[in-house]
Each structure stands twice: as C-alpha cells, then as structure tokens.
Image: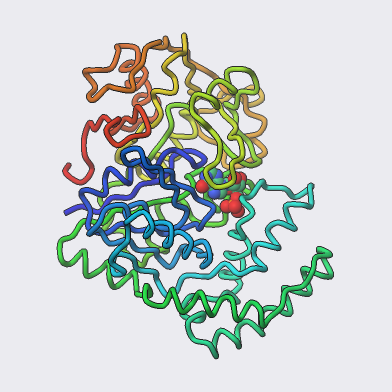
C-alpha cells in the first residue's frame, strides 16, 4: 500500500495532469487538496483532448473515486460545466465517483470582481488568473467565507449572504468604482447550483481514513507549483494556497504519516505565467522557440507563458521543501532540435554565488543565472519507450538533472500521449 503526492516543482504548468493520469492506474482514490479553477490540466486520451480545471484528472478512469478536499476553493458554475462536459463525453456515469468535501469554500461573484478590480490597479498587479482565487482564500482565513455546507442550507446561505454582501458591495462601489451585486440574484443562482451539487457532498477526511484503513492507494494531485506557494513561493507573486506538501494534510484532513512518496513534476526547461521573478527567463528567439515547440500557452487563460532554461536552484528548493522522493521530467521532446541546452546551477548575486534559492523575491529578481551547457541530441525522441531508446545526449541531460537537483528521475515524458512515457521506477510499487 502506498499513498503518493504529485507536486509541481517549478511555477506550475509542469504537466502534472498527465503524470497523475498515468499513476491513477495504481490508486483507488484521487484527491485534489488546494487551489481552484486557476489550475488547468490538459489530458490527451487517444486523440481526444480534455481540459479540467477542478475535477481531478482521475475522473477519466471509470471506477476510481475522485475527491475534492476542503482545501480547494470551488466555483460552482465551472464545476457543473465540467461535469456536463465529462458526461457528454461518456465519463462520470456514476455519481459516487466524485465527492466534494462540504467544508470547502465557494468562490462567489464578488471574489471574481475584486480579483479583476485589484489587477486593474497596475501598481499592485500579480498577473492572477482572474478567477477569484485570492479573494476567496482571504474570506476563508478572515472567517467570513461561504462553504458548500452553507450553500446547500437555504436559510443559512441567505443569512451568510446578507452578512457578507454589504461589505463587498461597499468595497466594489466605493473603493473600486464598480457596480454593486444583487443579493437576490446571487441567492437564486447559487441555490440552483447547490441543488445540483448536493449529491456529491461528503467528508474527504473520513472517506480517506477509511480508504487507508482498507489498504487502498491514494494519489494526491497538486495544482500550481512549489514556487507559487503562499508561504514558500516568490511572494507576493504567488497563488493564495499551500501548494507544497503541507497543503495535502490541511487540505484533506489526512495525517502526514500516511504520505509515502512525493513526486515532483518539472519540465525539462522552465515556464512561468503572470508577474514575478524568473531568473532563467529567455527574452530572445530561444524563449520564443521553446514557447512554440512546447505550445506554452495557458490552458486556463490562454496567456503566452514566459519560457527559460531549467533552473536547478529552484528545483532543489522544491526537493527540499517537499521532501521529494522522485522527479518526473516532462516535455523532454520539446528540446529535440536544440544544438545545446543550458541548465542553471547557481545564481550570481552581487559579489556572491548563491546555490540556495533566496527566500526573498526582491533578491531573486536581482539574481543572474550561472549556467552549465550540455550538448543537445538533435533527434526525435517522441517515440522512445524506455531509457535505452534515448540518444546518449538525452541520457546525459537527465543524469545531469539528477545530479544538480539531488533527486532521482522516476519518469520521463516525451510527448503528450499516455504511451509517450518512460517509467523508470514507480512510487506505488517501490
Ligand atoms: P491566482 O492563483 O489566480 O491568484 O494567480 C496568482 C499567480 O499564480 C499568477 O501569477 C498566476 O499566473 C499563477 N497561477 C495560478 N494558477 C496557476 C497554474 O495553474 N499554473 C501556472 N500559474 C498559475
């Protein structure tokens, strides 16, 4: 029996969805524990592409139970839209395949409005996804959030709504100069969502405890990435949840001793969306070449992603913070055509060489990457089924990544499809 966590080891968009999809075979329960519909997982099964923002990608496997834990913030309209879309494609035919924790917080219309209004104030721009994530977590921590259990009880929902909305309308109108929101319209719209959602409600913590007692395997599916963590990321250019390992426990009610393996997902290069420091970012045609070859455009917002070389200092930080037991390297095939490839192994900061990731975003902003250069393989590796199929230069690149991050590579992805994956060791079996 093993319970395994998948965590982004960079700034998000590392290709976690595909790895989760592959590991789901070994788990009976697949769980999301933080974030909301700021995430976007693109999954390719056969020739069919499915983009999921909220529902764990395990849903594409009939018979697996998918749980959305209390640490997630949920936009009901988006959630129900995903359900409709999945059911149209023949997935999720059994309602019991999906459970929502009743304690999770609901993203309300004012959260989106405030998120967008704050972003319009250019001096405070974070480059958020505009989905209301930060304001929803603010209300959670401020103890004025509306949870799913509130939403499904009309009187309680009405009471909470009338307590919180006047403050939000004051902020929207007087501070941001935006239109106010209508209480009755929100009540009607969200009560209708509640009726459809009610059948999925449950308690993630007790369900998972029972599954663990029964010897089942659990796969925890992280969203965003380590360096976007509210506490450990490049604050304030972060998301508002705990993307690191601790978020699994607070976001599901599962104790740390039940977590056996922690696999960090990292691209063979690096990307970031939104504002904030990114030492290895390439502003030249190489950055553009990576963006085109890797199709680096956000699956949530469609924004072009900032692209750069693999940053081993950043990934070492993810190894340390999360206690990563393995690394999955994705999109190795994107580097196919390159004559040479750079890896950042340290930062030059003022007169010093830093080998550790600075804990202050302003210092990180001033860091210059120190690179090692490796030969490219200049051949198509997208059909490689095992390490033996890879050209020597690709093997050397992976060996170098292991050395500079201090973490073994357990999986390599060489294309978007399930069959374009090299599994070196399996965290559920080792
Ligand atoms: P928020 O999560 O919408 O508040 O956005 C905060 C920051 O996190 C912005 O820089 C976003 O671009 C980034 N972000 C949020 N979700 C993702 C994701 O799933 N992948 C990559 N970046 C993300």
* Residue ID at (48%, 75%): 148
The one nearer the camera, 333 or 372, is 333
Q: Which quarter of the picture shows residue 44? A: top left
Q: Is residue 257 above or below residue 276?
A: below
Q: Is residue 6 left or right of residue 359?
A: left
* Quadrant (top left, top right, bottom left, bottom right) of the N terminus: bottom left
Q: Position of residue 298 (x, y in %)?
A: 55, 41
Q: Quadrant of residue 315?
A: top left
Which residue: 36% across, 51% down? Answer: 57
Coordinates of residue 347 in the picture (x, y in percent): 56, 25
Q: Which quarter of the rendered picture does the C terminus lie within?
A: top left
- Viewer-side residue, 89 vs 29: 89
- Residue at 36 percent across and 54 percent down: it is 89
Whether residue 247 is visible to the viewer of this picture, yes or no, is: no
Residue 216 vertical placement versus 323 (above, below): below
| Spot occupied by residue 395 in the image (x, y as percentages of width and height) | 30, 17
Residue that sits furthest to the bottom in the current view: 155
Residue 37 spot, x, y in % from top left: 52, 56
Query: What colour-coding does the image apply?
Result: rainbow
Q: Which quarter of the picture shows residue 88?
A: bottom left
Question: Between 82 and 262, which is closer to the camera in this rendering?
Answer: 82
**One can see residue 314 in this view:** yes
Q: Residue at x 67, y 68 (%)?
A: 110
Question: In this rendering, is residue 387 above or below 153?
Answer: above
């Amino acid at each position: 029996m093993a319970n395994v966590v998948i965590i982004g080891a960079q700034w998000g968009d590392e290709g976690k969805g595909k790895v989760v999809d592959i590991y789901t075979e070994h788990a009976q329960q697949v769980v999301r524990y933080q974030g909301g519909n700021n995430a976007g997982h693109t999954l390719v099964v056969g020739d069919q592409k499915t983009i999921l923002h909220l529902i764990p990608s395990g849903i594409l496997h009939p018979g697996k139970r998918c749980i959305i834990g209390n640490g997630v913030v949920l936009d009901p309209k988006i959630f129900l839209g995903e359900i409709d879309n999945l059911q149209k494609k023949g997935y999720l035919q059994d309602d019991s395949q999906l459970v929502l924790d009743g304690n999770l917080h609901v993203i309300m219309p004012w959260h989106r409005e405030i998120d967008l209004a704050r972003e319009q104030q250019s001096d405070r721009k974070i480059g958020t996804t505009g989905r209301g994530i930060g304001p929803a977590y603010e209300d959670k921590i401020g103890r004025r959030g509306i949870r799913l259990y509130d939403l499904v009880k009309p009187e309680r929902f009405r009471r909470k709504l009338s307590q919180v909305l006047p403050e939000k309308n004051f902020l929207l109108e007087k501070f941001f100069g935006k239109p106010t929101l209508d209480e009755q319209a929100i009540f009607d719209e969200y009560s209708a969502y509640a009726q459809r959602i009610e059948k999925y409600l449950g308690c993630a913590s007790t369900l998972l405890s029972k599954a663990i007692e029964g010897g089942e395997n659990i796969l925890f599916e992280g969203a965003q990435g380590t360096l976007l963590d509210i506490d450990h990321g490049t604050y304030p250019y972060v998301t508002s949840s705990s993307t690191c390992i601790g978020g699994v426990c607070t976001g599901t009610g599962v104790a740390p001793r039940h977590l056996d393996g922690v696999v960090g997902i990292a691209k063979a290069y690096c990307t970031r969306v939104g504002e904030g420091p990114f030492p290895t970012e390439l502003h030249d045609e190489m950055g553009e070449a990576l963006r085109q070859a890797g199709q680096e455009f956000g699956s949530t917002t469609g924004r072009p992603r900032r692209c750069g070389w693999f940053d081993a200092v950043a990934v070492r930080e993810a190894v340390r913070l999360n206690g990563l037991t393995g690394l999955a390297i994705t999109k190795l095939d994107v580097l196919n055509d390159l004559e040479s490839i750079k890896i950042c192994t340290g930062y030059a900061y003022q007169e010093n060489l830093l080998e550790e990731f600075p804990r202050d975003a302003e210092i990180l902003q001033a860091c210059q990457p120190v690179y090692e250069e490796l030969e490219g393989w200049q051949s198509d590796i997208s059909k490689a089924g095992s390490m033996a199929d890879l050209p020597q230069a690709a093997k050397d690149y992976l060996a170098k990544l292991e050395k500079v991050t201090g973490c073994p590579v357990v999986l390599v992805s060489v294309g978007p499809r399930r069959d374009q994956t090299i599994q070196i060791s399996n965290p559920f079996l080792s």
